[in-house]
Amino acid sequence: MAVSVNEAVPASPVRDRTPPARRIGGGGRGRSVLEIALLTVLAVVMLFPVLWMIETSIKENRDVYAVPAKFVDFQVTLAHYRDVFVDPGGGRSALSVAFLNSVLVAGVSTVLATLLGVPAAWAYSRFALKAKKDQLFFILSTRFMPPVVVVIPIFLMYRQVGLIDTPLGLILIYTAFNLPFTIWMIKGFVDEVPAEYEDAAMLDGYTRLQAFRKFTLPLLVPGIAATAVFALIFSWNEFVFAIFLTSSDDVRTAPPAIAGLIGGTTVDWGLVAASSVVFALPVLVFAYLVRRHLVAGVTLGAVRR
Amino acid sequence: MSDAVPLTTDRPGQVASVTPPARGRSRRLSDRKLAVAFIAPALLLLLAMSVFPLLWALYLSFTDYSATRGGSGSFVWFENYTAVLTSAQVHLRAVTTLIYVVGAVVLQTVLGFSIAYLISRRTHGRGLLTTLFLIPMMLSPVVVGLFWRFMLDAQFGVVNSMLGSLGLEQVEWLTRQRMALASLIMVDTWQWTPFIMLIALAGLTAVPKYLYEAASIDRASEWFRFRTITLPLVWPLLLIAVLFRAIEAFRLFDLVYILTSGGPGVSTETLSFHVYKVAFLGFNTGTASAYGILMVLVVIVLTQLYLRYLNKLKED
C-alpha cells in the first residue's frame, strides 16, 4: 500500500494541531508529531482513490489515459457528467433510467422493510415470547446467507411466477434482505424506551396498541429514520441480486448498469468515474447524516454503543 | 375506549374486550395476539424469501436438475455432494478462498486497529478524521471494483504511473496469477479496514480513563498499559468485528466479479464465484445447489460462532 506515499508530501503537510501537553510518560511531543504524520499518510492513502475518481470524472478523455498520469495540469470538462444523464443521440441516457430504477427499488423496499420491521421489533422488545432469542438469531442469520447461493433458487422461483426482470421481484428480495437488519436495529431503539411509559398509558385506559402508537412510536422516529437510511444504502449499493434477477435496460438498477459500462471493447473510464461519483454521492451524504449510528448500522444492529 | 387504530385495517381480534371482566387474563391474551400479528408478516416474508429458497436448493441438490434442460431432473441422492467434495477444482477454490479470507481479514484487523489506536490518542479533529477514513466502506463494491480496476491497469493505471515516476518497476496487478489474488486482498483491505477501525474505535473510547490514570500513577510502561488494559477490554468487540468480516469475505462475490472475473486463469476464483460459474455458466443447477448448500453450512457454523460471541458480549 505504499502506492501514494509520494502524494503525502505535497498534498498535506502535517497540520498545525498542538499536541496535548498533558501526556504522561511516553515520548511526549516528538512522538505525537510522528503519530500525526503517520495518520496523515494513512488518510491520504485511504482517500487517494476517491480523489482520483473525482479527478478522472472531470478530465478530458486524452488526459484520462495520459501516461504518466496527470495530477493537476489537466483540462476540466463536465462532458462525462452530461453523458451520465443525457444520451448522445438526445433524450434520456440508459444510465439515468437505471438511476431512477434504483431510486424506486431502494425506496420502496426500504419503506416495506420499515413497515414490517418496526411492529415486529416492538413486539420482540416488549413481549415475552417462546424462544425469543432463537427467533431473533434465526432472523439475523438469514442475512448472512451467501447471495450467490440464495439467488439460484430465487431465480428459479421467480422464473416460475414471472418475477424475473421486474422491479417487484427486486423490491421483494431487497425487503427480505433488509428486514433482519431493520428488526435488530429498531429493537435496540425500542429497548431504550422504558416499557413503563406504555404501562402508565394503559392504566389511563389506552389499549396496548394505542399506547405504542401515541407514546412509544414518536420517541422511535429518529431511530427509525436512521435505520431506514441504512436500509436505503444497502439496497442502493446491492449488486448480486440485481445482476442475476434483471436484464433489460428498463428495469436494471444502477450498479449493474455501471458495471455494464466496462463490457465493451473500449472502456470510457471518464464516464465510469462520473457515474460512480453520481452513484456514490447520495450514499456519502446519507451516511454522514446517520454517522452517530454507524457502529450499529454496519454490524446490522448487532453491536451498540 | 375508542377503537381508532388506522395502522391496522385487517385485524379482527381487536373488537373484543369492551367490558373487561378478567382483565389481566384478557389483556395477556390480546398481547399474545398483538405479538403474533406484529411478528407474523415479517417472519412470513423471511420464510418465503430466505428459508423456502434454501429448502428448494436443498431438494435440487439431490437431483441432476438443469435450469436450461427443463424437466424435473431425476433423484441422484448424494452424487452431487460427493462430486463437489472430491473435485480438485473445488479444493483449489477452497484454498484460494482461505488465502483471501485470512489475508484480507488479518490485514484489515492490523491496519484498522492501528488507525483506531492512533485516532483514539488524538484529542482534536477526531470526528473529522473518523469520517474521512470511513468513506471507502460506504461505497458500493461495484464502484470500488471498477475504480481499482482502472487504477491498477498495467498500461495507463495511476498506480503504475506513480511507480514509474519513482523509478520502480511496473507491476501487472491484475493479469499475473499471484499478483491478482494479492490485488484482490489489497482492494478488499482498502474498503474494509474502516469497518474494523470503526468498531475498534468504539471499543477504545469505551475504555474508562481512570484505568489509565491509575496505571500511570503506578508508572506502568506504555506497552504494559496497552497489553493489560487496552487489549483485554477491546478484544471482545474486535473479535465480533473480525468474525463479521470473515463471514462477509467468505460470501464475497461482487468484488471478484468486477475486479478480475476470477482471472487470470482461475487464480482469483473464490468459492462464491465458482458456484456462480457452475450455476449460471455451466447450468448444472443440481451440482451448484449442493455446492451452495455446503457453503451455507460453513456460513451457519461461522454465524453460530459470531452469535455466540455476540451473546457473550451482550451479557457482560
Image (cartoon, helix red, strand yellow):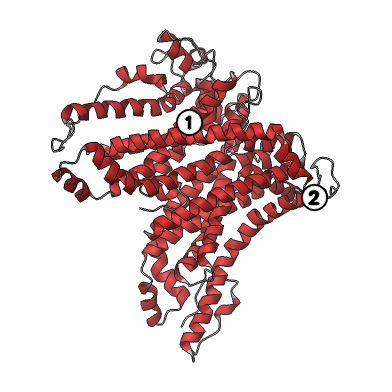
Element at label 1: helix
Residue B303 x, y percent position in the rendering: 54, 50
Residue drawn at (63%, 28%) of the image: B262
Q: Residues within 10 Å of mark 1 (few under 14, many from 20)?
A: some
Task: Determine if marks 1 and 2 fall on one subunit.
Answer: no
| Residue type for callout 2 | Trp
The one of B177 and A193 positioned closer to us in this rendering? B177
Q: Secondary structure at mark 2?
A: loop
Does A87 sit left or right of B310 as displayed? right
Asked if one can make out residue B91 in the rendered structure from this viewpoint, the answer is: yes
Q: Amino acid at mark 1?
A: Val
Q: Position of residue A210 (x, y in %)?
A: 45, 74
Residue located at (38% from left, 25% from top)? A45
Residue B7: assigned label: none
**Horizontal and vertical percent for residue A39?**
30, 29
Pointer 2 residue:
B77
State the CA–CA distance, disc 1 to disc 2.
50 Å
The residue tagged 1 is A277
